[in-house]
Image (cartoon, rainbow, N blue to C red):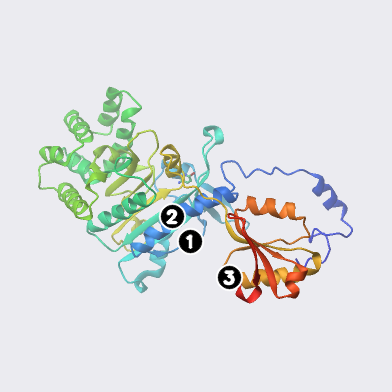
Amino acid sequence: STGDGGNGGGRSGALSPTLVTEELQKIDVNPPKGTRDFPPEDMRLRNWLFNNFREVSRVYGFEEVDFPVLESEALFIRKAGEEIRDQLYCFEDRGNRRVALRPELTPSLARLVIQKGKSLSLPLKWFAIGQCWRYERMTRGRRREHYQWNMDIIGVPEVTAEAELLSSIVAFFKRIGLTAADVGFKVSSRKVLQEVLKCYGIPENMFGKVCIIIDKIEKIPLDEMKKELKVVGVSEDAIEEMLQVLSVKSLTKLEEILGGGGEAMSDLKQLFSLAEKFGYSDWIQFDASIVRGLAYYTGIVFEMLFQGFDRGGKLRAICGGGRYDRLLSTFGGDDLPACGFGFGDAVIVELLKEKKLLPELNVEVENIVCALDPDLQGAASRVATILRGKGQTVDLVLENKPLKWVFKRATRINAQRLILVGSSEWQRGMVGVKDLSSGEQREVKLDELN
Ligand SMILES: Nc1ccc(Br)nc1
């Protein structure tokens, strides 16, 4: 530090009375409610997870992007009643601007695409890993931040985009040891319900309202739900058929109800056919019920959509995504076909714990270098620099410590070799090298050290 020894440098020198008072107040050393620290052992797991996200994104030819965690609040204020709006982590900054910590990444991506406009050559295949926020009353004790991996394809109207994204998530699951027996994807299309509603003359602008009511299917008695649907103008027959469709778990059955001519059926058939070619048919199933939560839980209205789930049925959705062709125009841009998913860092870790698939990630270093007396600290620094120049990891002992302490540290940091810089050896251009697994000890010429 180039601290001037003043109060700011935290070094010796007269402390002003205010600092003395402030210094004495004990601060809360825990992170803010709903947030996490990542000490080394947790950071190793997070890096392992994110490196898998990144490796899949790289192999699929996606480019990494990022955006500010702080955005204008207006980016996330869409239709009223959306859960994401109620939980927005928003405030007024010192310039009296309404800002918010991003609750999701897709609106920022849409903003950047609009900003870049015609300068972008389509299709875009972008990925991001970013921290997202929500402000929930802590009564529910849930987290207020998580990290999300997003992959988005902009400019491809065909179902091939959805198929490609699903393939990338399957590739990720396989990389971390999960199989189709552990997880799957429920796939559907909002067009399924739309076609049913259309048959009964329900206008498309009613879709959101109907979804919100249908989403209560497991929370309120059926006749209560039917009553609410009737209030918004859905007939008894339409309700019966909708409920029948919502329980359908196979494309064949769906075709019997909808007939083969509609867009929903052709989209879904194409997706399932592509899944077979990609080799992940075992991972996906049709499930109209996921359409229920469309209208509000993410704010982005998906056309075709998918949701990764654990087959044990104990956990919340692992990931979710789909097509959102109309998002850009909600921000005043020209619409472009868009498709993407979000994958949080919490549920997947819970699942890996349950499956005993969490990796053993120990700290390890190749060398610990120690001067045997204070006059050789410079020599030890030189040895460390030589090894580091060869790309080796080195923990350099920075203080005059007894050997017992050095061995203890070597064990704790899982060092493979101990390099001892002693006076007589150094005179002869040598250092002591001890292999900490075999115990073998030898002298090595400095210029032969590798
Ligand atoms: N959207 C969102 C943000 C933060 C958390 Br934790 N969960 C969901």
Label 1 to label 3: alpha-carbon separation: 42 Å
Q: Earlier in the sequence, mark 1 or mark 3?
A: 1
For the residue carrying disc 3, how many other residues have a C-alpha within 10 Å: few (<14), some (14-19), or many (20+)? few
Kindly identify which residue carries mark 1: 67
Q: Residues within 10 Å of mark 2 (few under 14, many from 20)?
A: many
Whether tag 1 and tag 2 are in contact, CB under 8 A, the answer is yes
Residue that sits furthest to the right in the current view: 14
Residue 150's image quarter? bottom left
Where in the figure is residue 178, as x and y percent of width and height?
35, 45
Q: Which residue is mark 2?
A: 105
Give the numbered dot on residue 237: none
Residue 201: x and y in percent read: 17, 40
Taking the image as shown, residue 412 lies to the left or right of residue 301, namely right
First-in-chain label (1 vs 2): 1
Residue 3 in view in this figure = yes
Q: Secondary structure at mark 1?
A: loop
Give the CA separation, mark 2 to mark 3: 45 Å
- Going by the numbered disc 3, the residue's amino acid type is Asn
- The residue labelled by disc 3 is 450
Could you tell me which secondary element the residue under label 3 belongs to? Answer: loop
Please indicate whether residue 315 sits to the left or right of residue 240 in the image. Answer: right
Q: Quadrant of residue 449?
A: bottom right
User: Element under label 2?
Assistant: loop
Q: Position of residue 182 (x, y in %)?
A: 33, 40
Of 186 and 415, the residue lying toward us: 415
Q: Quadrant of residue 230?
A: top left
148 or 410, which is in the foreground? 410
Q: Amino acid at mark 2?
A: Leu
Circles 1, 3 touching at the beta carbon (< 8 Å)? no
Identity, as a three-letter code, of the amino acid under mark 1: Phe
